Amino acid sequence: MLTKKQKNLLLFVNEKLKQTGISPSYDEMRSALNLKSKSGIHRLISALEERGFIKRLPHKARALEVVKLPENAATKDLYNSFSPKVIRGGLDEAENDKAEQFIQVIGKIAAGNPIEAIENQNEKVPVSISFLSSGEYFALKVNGDSMIGEGIHTGDYVIIKKSNSADNGQIVVALIDDHEATLKKLRKKSNTIALESANPEFETQIYSQERVKIQGILVSLYRKFN
């Protein structure tokens, strides 16, 4: 029998794989379960692996495979004790999943060096209505590979929840000097803001606070397979 935290982590990983095809990072799992350190996530993953619920894929970073789910797994289990930072989806709400809402793609976003700010487009991407909580959302097409360590690749569509503030460690759309937009992990310290990549080939960008405006927070990822 799984503990509540083991079950919550298993369901979170399963939902992330369903939505994006990519395992969540340890930071995402730690944040989702409201744990203070990654060591707790390591212990939970090891316990799930020992019980045969997940499998770690060799020679791949962040590669987890869900082998099975608990027989009594339900949506309510997933959200009783934590609030995952992805658009919510149900494990047992198949009928709701059939209804889709289209999120407007309002332009491209740099995952590399900053590029020209958001441009208007007419494209939309489908999102199940069961994924959406309160708030406003928009989508951006990713250009660049500075966030590949978080499983975000060129050509992906990021689903962004509008917000003018964010917490340390969250992946955000940041507007620099009211002109250039970029997708990066946010770090705030004193009077400066660091925009961190998830690719060692890209340097951290550091700006004074007044130069950076938060436009929204990454909540999910949409990928087309042609």
Image: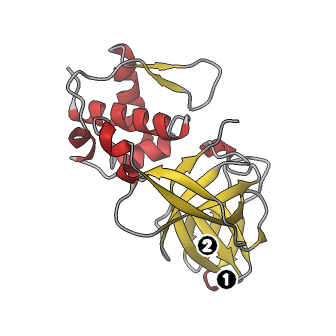
The x and y percentages for residue 45 are 40, 27
Q: Please identify the quarter of the rendering in which residue 41 is found.
A: top left
Left or right, residue 198 beside residue 187: right
Residue type, mark 1 in image: Arg
> The residue tagged with tag 2: helix, strand or loop?
strand
Left or right, residue 121 beside residue 170: right
> The residue tagged with tag 1: helix, strand or loop?
helix
From what the image shows, is residue 135 above or below residue 221?
below
Q: Nearer the viewer, residue 193 or 148?
A: 148
Q: Nearer the viewer, residue 59 or 118?
A: 118
In this view of the protein, can residue 84 be seen by the observer?
no
Residue type, mark 2 in image: Ile
Q: Which of marks 1 and 2 precedes in the sequence?
A: 2
- Which circle marks residue 203 in the picture? none
The x and y percentages for residue 160 are 53, 62
Q: Can you identify the residue that label 2 sits on?
A: 193
Of circles 2 and 1, which is in front?
A: 1
Q: Residue at x 42, y 53 (%)?
A: 85
